[in-house]
């Protein structure tokens, strides 16, 4: 077996393996490499294990995030929850991680993070995050019945405000971004650029869907969906705070679930959460169940797991300042910060 970094020449073989493996995610597709490199300006190292006959038997995509603020590390993959190793067995996986460690040492990164769905005992890891996933029925009626009367009442509450729901693609990016960037500012979190979302839709138009809900002619809630591999994800969703009292978020997620069923998805991924937090309980009320994440680390010369946790207290002052910045300023400087966060 040989493990090495691949180039675009192996793109077709890479994708063929990901598709045939049965465990590959949407983010394992080789086309994401150009997104990370071109749209996000990141260095990447895509590792593949080759059998003696030249066939691929394992892959591990790695993307480098490097900044003075947050450090220098490789991650598989950043910005999303999936993209760790795929292999034909534990020995192949072990060789992939061995090559990754050698690469990390050679280029001098502080650590490597691989976002896995199963344990890898050779590297230390953390299990504080879970994915909240709902198994979807075949129809909206079945889903509605499964939610119970209380949830259905919460979904109906915003209908008194005569909302208008729009679903589409690139034509809704402006409205989506207006809601999303405002909410991120209010939370004290740097926001991605509008260009990044446009780039995503341009590259993966068949997989991306945007939902915008207007109240009184004004965007009140918005979500960005990704449909792929029989699953719908909602990596970004936001509401305008003044509309929260009418439960606009409940209508937004109901519309997202409707879109997932219409797209033929069998599962709906509400995104990652920490167990027993507010977001965890919000997702659980829809019937979502936790799937454990195993994030494993090569630590180089360190013996401490890295942690960029906004709730640790380390960033409290920065968060408070950010919340009071003009929205126009956060939209300009936020993208240059957040692209270095995993």
Image (cartoon, rainbow, N blue to C red):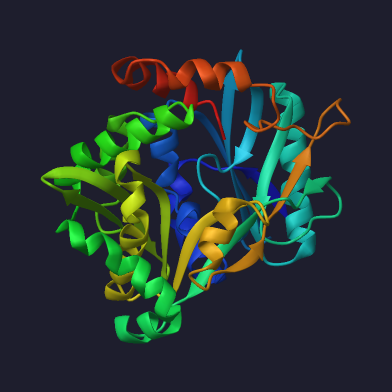
Identity of the residue drawn at 32% across and 21% down: 327
Q: Position of residue 165 (x, y in %)?
A: 18, 58
- Which residue is farthest left? 217
Q: Quadrant of residue 98?
A: top right
Work out whether residue 104 or residue 255 is closer to the camera in this orientation and state it: 255
Picture quarter containing residue 29? Answer: bottom left
Task: Compare residues 342 and 130 and report the one nearer the observer.
Answer: 130
Taking 27 as reference, is 273 left or right? right
Considering only vertical position in the picture, is 185 above or below 259? above
Q: Is residue 61 visible?
A: yes
Above-or-below relation of 257 to 190: below
- Specify the quadrant of the image occupied by residue 36: top left
Query: Front-most of 302 and 267?
Result: 267
Give left or right: position of 281 versus 126: left
Which quadrant, please, contains the N terminus? bottom right
- Residue at the limit of the structure toward the right, as seen here: 303
Residue 163 in sight: no
Count all numbered tags in the image, as a single digit.
0
Q: Quadrant of the C terminus?
A: top right
Q: Position of residue 140 (x, y in %)?
A: 31, 80
- Residue 341 at x, y percent in the picture: 55, 30
Is 104 left or right of 31, judged from the image as shown?
right
Above or below: residue 73 compared with residue 147? above
In the displayed structure, 117 sits above or below 43; it is below
Closer to us: 276 or 288: 276
Q: Position of residue 266 (x, y in %)?
A: 43, 77
| Residue found at x 65% / y 33% | 311
Q: Residue at x 76, y 37 (%)?
A: 101
């Amino acid at each position: 077996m040989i493990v090495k970094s691949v180039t675009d020449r192996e793109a077709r073989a890479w994708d063929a393996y990901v598709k045939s493996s049965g465990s590959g995610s949407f983010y394992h597709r080789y086309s994401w490499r150009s997104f990370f490199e071109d749209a996000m300006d990141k260095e990447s190292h895509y590792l593949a294990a080759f059998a003696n006959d030249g066939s691929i038997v394992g892959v591990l995509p790695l993307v480098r995030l490097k900044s003075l603020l947050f450090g220098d590390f490789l991650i598989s993959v950043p910005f999303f929850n999936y993209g760790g190793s795929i292999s034909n067995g534990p020995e192949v996986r072990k060789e992939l991680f061995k090559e990754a460690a050698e690469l990390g040492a050679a280029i001098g990164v502080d650590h490597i993070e691989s976002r896995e769905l199963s344990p890898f005992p050779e590297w230390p890891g953390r299990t504080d995050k879970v994915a909240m996933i709902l198994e979807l029925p075949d129809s909206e009626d079945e889903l509605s019945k499964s939610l119970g009367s209380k949830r259905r009442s919460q979904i109906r509450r915003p209908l008194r405000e005569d909302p208008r729901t729009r679903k589409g693609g690139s034509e809704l990016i402006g409205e989506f971004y207006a809601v999303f960037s405002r909410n991120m500012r209010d939370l004290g979190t740097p926001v991605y650029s509008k260009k990044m979302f446009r780039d995503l839709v341009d590259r993966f138009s068949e997989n991306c869907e945007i939902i915008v809900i207007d109240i009184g002619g004004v965007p009140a809630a918005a979500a960005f969906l990704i449909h792929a591999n029989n699953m719908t994800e909602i990596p970004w969703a936001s509401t305008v705070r003044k509309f929260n009292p009418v439960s606009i978020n409940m209508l937004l997620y109901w519309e997202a679930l409707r879109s997932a069923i219409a797209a033929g998805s069998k599962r709906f991924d509400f995104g990652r959460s920490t167990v027993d937090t507010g977001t965890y309980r919000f997702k659980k009320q829809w019937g979502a169940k936790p799937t454990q994440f195993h994030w494993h680390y090569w630590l180089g010369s360190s013996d401490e797991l890295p942690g960029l946790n906004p709730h640790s207290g380390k960033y409290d002052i920065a968060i408070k300042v950010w919340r009071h910045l003009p929205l126009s300023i956060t939209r300009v400087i936020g993208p240059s910060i957040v692209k270095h966060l995993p």
